[in-house]
Image (cartoon, rainbow, N blue to C red):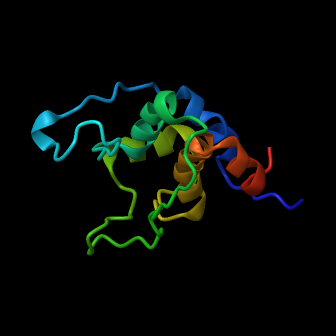
């Protein structure tokens, strides 16, 4: 089967395991409706938020719909996808290295997306995982 490889892939394959768990906490002042509805809005780094969901929802999610950054390098619209946040830039320097400083390079985008996709996969029910992913 074909495999996608890029600069830095070997460094990010297990990165999701290294992300620390952050405790999700309720914010009553930001809540609406029934507290036991099961609905949540998470505010924060999406990698840490996904990791925080695992203890509660591992293998229980039936559908994930994501709208990932498009890697266009644009800053002038509602989503800045230049991936130039200080935290990301520092992480890229450690993981991908300094092969050029162009943050719109596709290998850096793939390094950013890979751990998030791994955590999303872990949230999906095992039946869905078998249908859509190879081990």
Question: Is residue 5 visible to us here?
Answer: no
- For residue 42, side relative to residue 66 (left or right): left
User: Is 83 rendered above or below residue 94?
Assistant: below
Q: Position of residue 106 (x, y in %)?
A: 58, 64
- For residue 13, side relative to residue 80 (left or right): right
- Quarter occupied by residue 52: top left
In the picture as drawn, the residue positioned furthest to the left comes out as 29
Residue at figure coordinates x 52%, y 37% from the top left: 94
- For residue 23, side relative to residue 30 (left or right): right
Residue at figure coordinates x 27%, y 28% from the top left: 25
- For residue 42, side relative to residue 130 (left or right): left
Which image quarter is the N terminus in?
bottom right
Which image quarter is the C terminus in?
top right
Residue nearest the observer in this picture, 60 or 74: 60
Q: Position of residue 102 (x, y in %)?
A: 47, 62
Q: Position of residue 104 (x, y in %)?
A: 48, 65
């Amino acid at each position: 089967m074909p495999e996608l490889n890029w600069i830095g892939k070997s460094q990010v394959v297990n990165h999701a395991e290294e992300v620390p768990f952050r405790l999700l906490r309720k914010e009553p002042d930001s809540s609406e409706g029934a507290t036991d509805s099961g609905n949540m809005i998470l505010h924060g780094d999406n990698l840490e938020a996904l990791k925080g969901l695992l203890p509660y929802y591992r293998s229980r999610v039936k559908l994930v719909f994501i709208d990932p950054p498009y890697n266009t390098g644009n800053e002038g619209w509602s989503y800045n996808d230049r991936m130039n946040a200080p935290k990301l830039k520092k992480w890229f320097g450690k993981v991908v290295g300094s092969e050029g400083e162009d943050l719109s390079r596709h290998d850096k985008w793939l390094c950013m997306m890979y751990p998030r996709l791994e955590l999303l996969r872990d949230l999906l029910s095992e039946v869905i995982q078998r249908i859509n992913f190879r081990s």
